[in-house]
Image (spheres, helix red, strand yellow):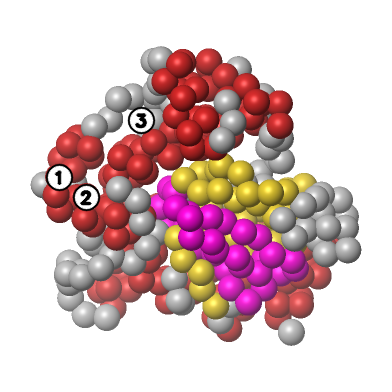
Amino acid sequence: MSKQQIKQLIENQLSEDGMVETGVNGVQLFRVTDSMRCAPAVYEPTVIAIVSGAKEAILDGKRFVYDNSQYMCCAMSMPVEAGTPAASPDNPLLGAYISLDTRVMTELSIEIESAAGAIHRPKGGPLPQGLALARWDDAFTEALLRLLQLVDNPMDAAVLGNSRLREVYYAILKGDAGDSARRAFGVGNEIARAIGYLSSRLNEAVSIEELAAQVSMSRAVFHRKFKQATTMSPIQFVKSMRLNSAAMKIAGGMNVNEAAMAVGYVSSSQFSREFKRMYGESPRQWSRSSQLPDGMR
Protein backbone atom coordinates (compact mmCIF):
# COMPACT_ATOMS: atom_id res chain seq x y z
CA MET A 1 0.00 0.00 0.00
CA SER A 2 2.82 2.43 0.87
CA LYS A 3 4.39 2.00 -2.56
CA GLN A 4 1.08 2.81 -4.21
CA GLN A 5 0.84 5.93 -2.05
CA ILE A 6 4.33 6.97 -3.22
CA LYS A 7 3.24 6.49 -6.83
CA GLN A 8 0.14 8.62 -6.25
CA LEU A 9 2.22 11.39 -4.66
CA ILE A 10 4.54 11.46 -7.68
CA GLU A 11 1.64 11.40 -10.17
CA ASN A 12 0.07 14.34 -8.34
CA GLN A 13 3.24 16.39 -8.89
CA LEU A 14 3.86 15.49 -12.54
CA SER A 15 1.22 15.66 -15.25
CA GLU A 16 3.87 16.06 -17.98
CA ASP A 17 7.37 14.69 -18.61
CA GLY A 18 10.22 16.26 -16.69
CA MET A 19 11.76 16.60 -13.25
CA VAL A 20 10.45 18.65 -10.33
CA GLU A 21 12.04 19.73 -7.07
CA THR A 22 10.44 18.53 -3.86
CA GLY A 23 11.57 21.28 -1.52
CA VAL A 24 14.03 18.88 0.10
CA ASN A 25 17.59 19.48 -1.08
CA GLY A 26 18.80 16.74 -3.44
CA VAL A 27 15.40 15.06 -3.89
CA GLN A 28 13.61 15.28 -7.23
CA LEU A 29 10.68 13.50 -8.86
CA PHE A 30 10.57 12.57 -12.54
CA ARG A 31 8.26 11.36 -15.29
CA VAL A 32 9.36 10.03 -18.72
CA THR A 33 7.19 8.70 -21.53
CA ASP A 34 9.80 8.70 -24.32
CA SER A 35 11.77 5.54 -25.01
CA MET A 36 15.48 6.43 -24.91
CA ARG A 37 18.28 4.07 -25.83
CA CYS A 38 21.14 3.68 -23.39
CA ALA A 39 23.73 6.42 -23.87
CA PRO A 40 26.88 7.56 -22.04
CA ALA A 41 26.27 9.10 -18.63
CA VAL A 42 27.99 9.62 -15.31
CA TYR A 43 26.07 8.55 -12.25
CA GLU A 44 26.96 10.61 -9.19
CA PRO A 45 26.34 9.15 -5.69
CA THR A 46 22.60 8.73 -5.82
CA VAL A 47 19.61 6.47 -5.31
CA ILE A 48 16.94 6.16 -8.00
CA ALA A 49 13.65 4.63 -6.93
CA ILE A 50 11.16 3.66 -9.67
CA VAL A 51 7.45 3.26 -8.92
CA SER A 52 6.25 2.70 -12.49
CA GLY A 53 8.08 1.41 -15.54
CA ALA A 54 11.76 0.43 -15.63
CA LYS A 55 15.12 2.10 -16.09
CA GLU A 56 18.34 0.60 -17.38
CA ALA A 57 22.04 1.14 -16.74
CA ILE A 58 25.04 -0.64 -18.23
CA LEU A 59 28.37 -0.67 -16.39
CA ASP A 60 31.34 -2.20 -18.23
CA GLY A 61 28.99 -4.46 -20.22
CA LYS A 62 26.90 -5.56 -17.23
CA ARG A 63 23.23 -4.64 -17.51
CA PHE A 64 21.22 -3.40 -14.51
CA VAL A 65 17.44 -3.11 -14.90
CA TYR A 66 15.52 -1.69 -11.97
CA ASP A 67 11.83 -1.06 -11.38
CA ASN A 68 9.39 -1.00 -8.46
CA SER A 69 10.88 -4.18 -7.02
CA GLN A 70 14.47 -2.90 -6.77
CA TYR A 71 15.97 0.56 -6.39
CA MET A 72 19.39 1.53 -7.73
CA CYS A 73 22.10 2.73 -5.37
CA CYS A 74 25.24 4.26 -6.87
CA ALA A 75 27.61 4.88 -3.97
CA MET A 76 30.40 6.56 -5.97
CA SER A 77 30.69 8.40 -9.29
CA MET A 78 30.50 5.83 -12.09
CA PRO A 79 30.68 6.04 -15.90
CA VAL A 80 27.71 4.12 -17.28
CA GLU A 81 25.34 3.92 -20.21
CA ALA A 82 21.80 4.69 -19.12
CA GLY A 83 18.39 4.98 -20.70
CA THR A 84 14.66 4.32 -20.54
CA PRO A 85 14.08 1.87 -23.43
CA ALA A 86 10.73 0.64 -22.07
CA ALA A 87 9.13 4.03 -21.38
CA SER A 88 5.99 4.97 -23.35
CA PRO A 89 2.84 7.08 -22.87
CA ASP A 90 1.02 3.89 -21.85
CA ASN A 91 3.84 2.84 -19.53
CA PRO A 92 5.39 6.04 -18.10
CA LEU A 93 8.54 5.93 -16.02
CA LEU A 94 7.86 7.48 -12.63
CA GLY A 95 10.26 7.75 -9.75
CA ALA A 96 12.38 9.67 -7.28
CA TYR A 97 15.99 10.77 -7.64
CA ILE A 98 17.84 11.12 -4.32
CA SER A 99 21.36 12.56 -4.19
CA LEU A 100 23.51 11.04 -1.46
CA ASP A 101 25.06 13.75 0.69
CA THR A 102 28.63 12.68 1.48
CA ARG A 103 28.76 14.31 4.91
CA VAL A 104 25.48 12.84 6.16
CA MET A 105 26.13 9.39 4.67
CA THR A 106 29.59 9.33 6.27
CA GLU A 107 28.21 10.37 9.67
CA LEU A 108 25.53 7.67 9.50
CA SER A 109 27.94 4.98 8.32
CA ILE A 110 30.28 5.67 11.23
CA GLU A 111 27.37 5.86 13.69
CA ILE A 112 26.12 2.47 12.49
CA GLU A 113 29.58 0.95 12.90
CA SER A 114 29.90 2.53 16.33
CA ALA A 115 26.48 1.27 17.45
CA ALA A 116 27.42 -2.23 16.32
CA GLY A 117 30.64 -2.15 18.37
CA ALA A 118 34.05 -0.59 18.05
CA ILE A 119 34.75 1.19 14.78
CA HIS A 120 37.27 -0.85 12.81
CA ARG A 121 38.64 -1.06 9.32
CA PRO A 122 36.80 -3.51 7.05
CA LYS A 123 38.30 -6.96 6.77
CA GLY A 124 40.06 -8.03 3.60
CA GLY A 125 38.28 -9.71 0.72
CA PRO A 126 36.49 -8.50 -2.41
CA LEU A 127 35.08 -4.99 -2.22
CA PRO A 128 31.34 -4.56 -2.80
CA GLN A 129 30.70 -2.89 -6.15
CA GLY A 130 29.88 0.80 -6.29
CA LEU A 131 26.66 0.23 -8.26
CA ALA A 132 24.08 -2.06 -6.64
CA LEU A 133 20.40 -2.95 -6.81
CA ALA A 134 18.44 -3.34 -3.59
CA ARG A 135 15.01 -4.70 -2.72
CA TRP A 136 12.31 -2.19 -1.83
CA ASP A 137 12.12 -3.41 1.76
CA ASP A 138 9.59 -2.06 4.26
CA ALA A 139 12.08 0.27 5.94
CA PHE A 140 13.03 1.98 2.67
CA THR A 141 9.43 2.19 1.46
CA GLU A 142 8.11 3.72 4.69
CA ALA A 143 11.00 6.19 4.94
CA LEU A 144 10.55 7.32 1.31
CA LEU A 145 6.80 7.73 1.80
CA ARG A 146 7.32 9.87 4.90
CA LEU A 147 9.81 12.02 2.97
CA LEU A 148 7.57 12.55 -0.06
CA GLN A 149 4.55 13.37 2.11
CA LEU A 150 6.31 16.69 2.77
CA VAL A 151 6.15 17.73 -0.90
CA ASP A 152 2.87 19.69 -0.73
CA ASN A 153 3.84 21.65 2.38
CA PRO A 154 6.87 23.95 1.97
CA MET A 155 7.07 24.64 5.72
CA ASP A 156 7.08 20.94 6.57
CA ALA A 157 9.68 20.31 3.88
CA ALA A 158 11.91 23.10 5.22
CA VAL A 159 11.62 22.01 8.87
CA LEU A 160 11.43 18.21 8.58
CA GLY A 161 13.04 17.50 5.21
CA ASN A 162 16.60 16.87 6.38
CA SER A 163 15.55 14.57 9.22
CA ARG A 164 13.30 12.49 6.96
CA LEU A 165 15.96 12.34 4.26
CA ARG A 166 18.30 11.05 6.96
CA GLU A 167 15.77 8.25 7.63
CA VAL A 168 15.90 7.30 3.94
CA TYR A 169 19.71 7.26 4.05
CA TYR A 170 19.61 5.04 7.13
CA ALA A 171 17.24 2.61 5.40
CA ILE A 172 19.61 2.46 2.41
CA LEU A 173 22.62 1.77 4.65
CA LYS A 174 20.69 -1.02 6.39
CA GLY A 175 19.29 -2.51 3.17
CA ASP A 176 20.63 -4.74 0.41
CA ALA A 177 22.92 -1.98 -0.90
CA GLY A 178 24.21 -1.25 2.58
CA ASP A 179 27.55 -3.03 2.20
CA SER A 180 28.33 -1.03 -0.93
CA ALA A 181 27.18 2.28 0.57
CA ARG A 182 28.93 1.80 3.93
CA ARG A 183 32.16 0.86 2.19
CA ALA A 184 31.94 3.99 0.04
CA PHE A 185 31.11 6.41 2.86
CA GLY A 186 32.48 4.80 6.01
CA VAL A 187 35.85 3.61 7.20
CA GLY A 188 37.90 1.97 4.42
CA ASN A 189 36.48 4.15 1.65
CA GLU A 190 39.78 4.62 -0.20
CA ILE A 191 38.43 3.78 -3.67
CA ALA A 192 35.47 6.14 -3.30
CA ARG A 193 37.85 8.90 -2.15
CA ALA A 194 40.13 8.28 -5.13
CA ILE A 195 37.16 8.49 -7.49
CA GLY A 196 36.02 11.70 -5.80
CA TYR A 197 39.50 13.14 -6.30
CA LEU A 198 39.43 12.17 -9.99
CA SER A 199 35.88 13.46 -10.57
CA SER A 200 36.85 16.93 -9.40
CA ARG A 201 39.88 16.97 -11.75
CA LEU A 202 38.62 15.54 -15.05
CA ASN A 203 40.18 18.46 -16.89
CA GLU A 204 43.62 17.68 -15.45
CA ALA A 205 46.18 14.99 -16.28
CA VAL A 206 45.74 12.75 -13.22
CA SER A 207 47.95 9.65 -13.24
CA ILE A 208 47.16 6.27 -11.68
CA GLU A 209 50.18 6.72 -9.42
CA GLU A 210 48.72 10.01 -8.20
CA LEU A 211 45.35 8.39 -7.45
CA ALA A 212 47.04 5.54 -5.57
CA ALA A 213 49.17 8.00 -3.60
CA GLN A 214 46.06 9.93 -2.58
CA VAL A 215 44.86 6.88 -0.63
CA SER A 216 48.31 5.62 0.44
CA MET A 217 48.27 2.44 -1.65
CA SER A 218 50.81 0.86 -3.95
CA ARG A 219 49.85 0.90 -7.62
CA ALA A 220 49.33 -2.90 -7.60
CA VAL A 221 47.04 -2.93 -4.54
CA PHE A 222 45.15 0.11 -5.81
CA HIS A 223 44.61 -1.54 -9.21
CA ARG A 224 43.24 -4.73 -7.63
CA LYS A 225 40.88 -3.00 -5.18
CA PHE A 226 39.75 -0.49 -7.79
CA LYS A 227 38.73 -3.21 -10.22
CA GLN A 228 36.83 -5.07 -7.48
CA ALA A 229 34.79 -1.95 -6.70
CA THR A 230 34.18 -0.67 -10.24
CA THR A 231 34.69 -3.76 -12.50
CA MET A 232 37.15 -1.64 -14.52
CA SER A 233 40.86 -1.03 -14.35
CA PRO A 234 41.81 2.49 -13.21
CA ILE A 235 42.93 3.39 -16.74
CA GLN A 236 39.64 2.16 -18.27
CA PHE A 237 37.69 4.03 -15.61
CA VAL A 238 39.50 7.33 -16.14
CA LYS A 239 38.98 7.12 -19.90
CA SER A 240 35.29 6.20 -19.51
CA MET A 241 34.66 9.04 -17.05
CA ARG A 242 36.26 11.56 -19.39
CA LEU A 243 34.58 10.33 -22.58
CA ASN A 244 31.16 9.87 -20.94
CA SER A 245 31.35 13.35 -19.46
CA ALA A 246 32.32 14.77 -22.86
CA ALA A 247 29.50 12.86 -24.59
CA MET A 248 26.97 14.33 -22.15
CA LYS A 249 28.31 17.84 -22.72
CA ILE A 250 28.14 17.40 -26.51
CA ALA A 251 24.60 15.98 -26.31
CA GLY A 252 23.69 19.00 -24.18
CA GLY A 253 24.85 21.35 -26.93
CA MET A 254 28.51 22.07 -26.12
CA ASN A 255 30.99 22.50 -28.97
CA VAL A 256 33.06 19.31 -29.58
CA ASN A 257 36.43 21.01 -29.03
CA GLU A 258 35.22 22.71 -25.85
CA ALA A 259 33.90 19.39 -24.52
CA ALA A 260 37.25 17.70 -25.25
CA MET A 261 39.18 20.40 -23.38
CA ALA A 262 36.70 20.36 -20.49
CA VAL A 263 37.61 16.74 -19.75
CA GLY A 264 41.36 17.10 -20.09
CA TYR A 265 42.12 16.34 -23.75
CA VAL A 266 44.72 18.61 -25.35
CA SER A 267 44.61 16.85 -28.73
CA SER A 268 41.29 17.01 -30.58
CA SER A 269 42.42 14.23 -32.94
CA GLN A 270 43.20 11.89 -30.01
CA PHE A 271 39.83 12.75 -28.46
CA SER A 272 38.02 11.97 -31.72
CA ARG A 273 39.86 8.65 -32.14
CA GLU A 274 39.12 7.48 -28.59
CA PHE A 275 35.54 8.73 -28.75
CA LYS A 276 34.82 6.83 -31.97
CA ARG A 277 36.54 3.69 -30.63
CA MET A 278 34.28 3.72 -27.57
CA TYR A 279 30.95 4.80 -29.07
CA GLY A 280 31.22 3.83 -32.74
CA GLU A 281 30.57 7.42 -33.89
CA SER A 282 32.75 10.48 -34.24
CA PRO A 283 32.00 13.33 -31.79
CA ARG A 284 30.40 15.34 -34.58
CA GLN A 285 28.18 12.41 -35.62
CA TRP A 286 27.28 12.00 -31.97
CA SER A 287 26.32 15.67 -31.65
CA ARG A 288 23.90 15.30 -34.55
CA SER A 289 22.33 12.01 -33.44
CA SER A 290 22.10 12.45 -29.66
CA GLN A 291 19.86 14.45 -27.43
CA LEU A 292 20.29 14.64 -23.67
CA PRO A 293 16.91 14.71 -21.89
CA ASP A 294 16.77 16.96 -18.84
CA GLY A 295 18.24 15.10 -15.88
CA MET A 296 17.30 11.68 -17.14
CA ARG A 297 20.69 10.00 -17.50
Tag of residue 233: none
**Whole-percent x and y of residue 19?**
73, 48
Q: Which residue is mark 2?
A: 223
Pick the residue in front: 241 or 184: 241
- Amino acid at dot 2: His
Left or right: where 169 falls relative to 179: right
Query: Mark 2 near mark 3, Cβ–Cβ under 8 Å?
Result: no
The image quadrant of residue 153 is bottom right
Q: Which residue is mark 3?
A: 201
Query: Magenta segment, which residues?
Result: 50-78
Residue 101 appears in view: no
Any magenta on residue 72? yes
Left or right: where 203 falls relative to 42: left
For marks 1 and 3, the one nearer the N-term is 3
How many other residues sit within 10 Å of disc 3, few (<14), some (14-19) or many (≥20)? Answer: some
Left or right: where 58 falls relative to 12: left
- Amino acid at dot 3: Arg
- Amino acid at dot 1: Arg
Q: Quick one: SS at disc 3?
A: loop
Q: Is residue 289 above or below residue 87?
A: above
Any magenta on residue 296? no
Q: Which residue is mark 1?
A: 219
The image quadrant of residue 231 is bottom left
Q: CA distance from mark 1 to mark 3?
A: 19 Å
Query: Mark 1 near mark 2, Cβ–Cβ under 8 Å?
Result: yes
**Whole-percent x and y of residue 46?**
51, 55
For marks 2 and 3, the one nearer the N-term is 3
Q: Residue at x 70, y 40 (%)?
A: 294
